[in-house]
Image (cartoon, rainbow, N blue to C red):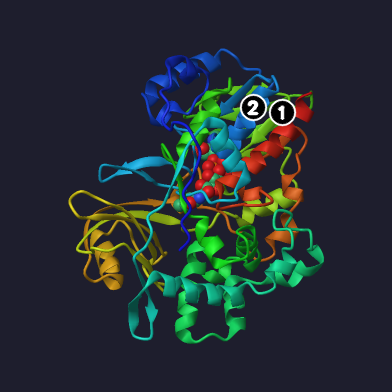
Amino acid sequence: MNRHGGNYAGASDRTIGRRSLLKAAGATALASTLAATTAGRAAAEEERTWDAIVIGAGYAGGTAARELTAKGLKTLVIEARGRIGGRIWTGSFAGEQVEIGGGWFGPGQTNVERELQRYGITTSADVASTRAVMPSTTGFASQAPADAFGHLGTLFGQFYAGSETYFERPLEPLYRKDLLPSVDATSLAARLNQLGLSPTDQKWINGSTSVFAGGPSSTGGLAGMAQWYQLAGGTYDGFLSTMSLKPAGGMISLLQAMLSGSSARILYNSPVTSVTDTGFGLTSVKTAAGWTYQAPVVVVAVPVNVWRTITFNPGLPKAHADAALEGVGVPTATKMWLQLKGVTDAVYAQAPEGSPILMMLPQKQLADGSRLYVAFTGANLNVSDAAAVKAAVAGIVPEATVVSYRAMEWGKDTYTRGGWALRKPGQLLRQLPAIQQPHGRMVFAGSDIASGWYGAFVEGAIESGLRAAQQAAALAG
Ligand SMILES: Cc1cc2nc3c(=O)[nH]c(=O)nc-3n(C[C@H](O)[C@H](O)[C@H](O)COP(=O)(O)OP(=O)(O)OC[C@H]3O[C@@H](n4cnc5c(N)ncnc54)[C@H](O)[C@@H]3O)c2cc1C
């Protein structure tokens, strides 16, 4: 597995003062959330009219807010939760800082690289695997990581054959639109069936494709994963490297830095229920508590799967409405942290589609000899059932004992309603670029609708936030 060490100079954690908390900042995870929230709310409630409103304080909304304030626009961010970050959530488990949502950056993600450099945030390489446990004819077998990843590379090379042509410019996915109709219509499962692989080789691939599809491989589109593969350089090593770097201070540290340096104000714990274009040059945003705020332009930076819970007046255009109905965020996306004893080496494990646990990645070794692991689980595992979790781990790594675990079911989260996004078959051609266009005085942002590293990457959220800020500034002016 390729592991790249980062090389950015500077510090990681920042101490954020009360003034910044009232202004904006991503300090909720660090300081007294309630106090900050109450103070922020009181201050913001005095002002109902803004130059711009951003709904959602994830990486897309945070980027848009920073850019809009930099253009001199008085900007209010309205966030449903008591924290910034959305699908990025730097939390804790077993006394360690861990990522409950997105966990890694990768080299070549130029927006992230530029922002890390701008704020002087360093990165470190993730833990390297020392053993791979992969499906075999009789269950599972251990291999040297280089052998396992080498074979996976060969299989995925076949799987994505042709993608270097149909995604000749992967940052512009429609550049070879002429070649895409059949690719876009193909599901991951259908592509796998085209290859005629042995049953064991099929299991090597379908565990991975069902992780990224966040459900059955039949629901995820080939085009989505093939685009990521080409963005990562068209090699399996490159694809693995998208999960290789961790920023100092956790995944949230960059967003905290971006918002700390901005004058945007954040209103926490305020789910938006409706967005209405008044027809008089203003858009009105209403929160669940009944407060309304107005601005000439509103950036909707909530996950696409959440759009259906917000009333838009006038209603959304077809591409947006279709996406909201179909969903782009994958349905399951359950990420589990495990503390395991009894395994002395750093095990990377993959299981066939339909298994309770689909993938395990080794993380930090603790002082007591136990090791932390990240696992992505399938729909078949009830993560509330500790006995089932233990049995699932034992099914892959029999020598392991589960000391403790923490699971987050993103598909059940009210303000996400899905995990990362992977376009379903047909969604690329039906939705891009229409879904990136403003609707009256409403502008849309989010990694779910990015062009390049869309869906499963903070990189795409930043790309989309930058575009939305430009669109919004034009409308606000
Ligand atoms: C388990 C998991 C693992 C991942 N792994 C990686 C990874 O390793 N690397 C990587 O780069 N990316 C990863 N991703 C994807 C990455 O987290 C997302 O692409 C990115 O964070 C999305 O940013 P966003 O701003 O578009 O959306 P979000 O982060 O979802 O932000 C949207 C914001 O809107 C808020 N909101 C929702 N509804 C409302 C409402 N009604 N009113 C007001 N606010 C509302 C939410 O609370 C949230 O703060 C992962 C995602 C998940 C779930």
Q: From the image, tell me which residue sits under label 1.
A: 297
Q: Could you tell me which residue is drawn at 43 percent across and 41 percent down?
A: 89
Give percent across and percent down for residue 253: 46, 35
Farthest residue to the right: give it. 178
Between 285 and 353, the one lying in front of the other is: 353
Q: Is residue 342 left or right of residue 71?
A: left
Give percent across and percent down for residue 233: 62, 61
What amino acid is found at the position of numbered circle 1 in the picture?
A: Val
Give percent across and percent down for residue 374: 36, 56
Badge 2: residue crowd in 10 Å (few <14, some 14–19, many ≥20) = many
Q: Could you tell me which residue is drawn at 57 percent across and 78 percent down?
A: 192
Residue 350 visible to an observer of this rendering = no
Residue 286 visible to an observer of this rendering = yes
Give percent across and percent down for residue 43: 51, 14
Q: Quadrant of residue 96?
A: top left
Between 385 and 187, the one lying in front of the other is: 187
**Which of disc 1 and disc 2 is earlier in sequence?**
2
Badge 1: residue crowd in 10 Å (few <14, some 14–19, many ≥20) = many
Q: Could you tell me which residue is drawn at 60 percent across and 59 percent down?
A: 232
Between 383 and 460, the one lying in front of the other is: 460
Tag 2 near tag 1, CB within 8 Å = yes
Q: From the image, tell me which residue sits under label 2.
A: 53
- Mark 1 residue element: loop
Between 11 and 336, the one lying in front of the other is: 11
- Mark 2 residue element: strand
Q: Which mark is residue 23?
A: none
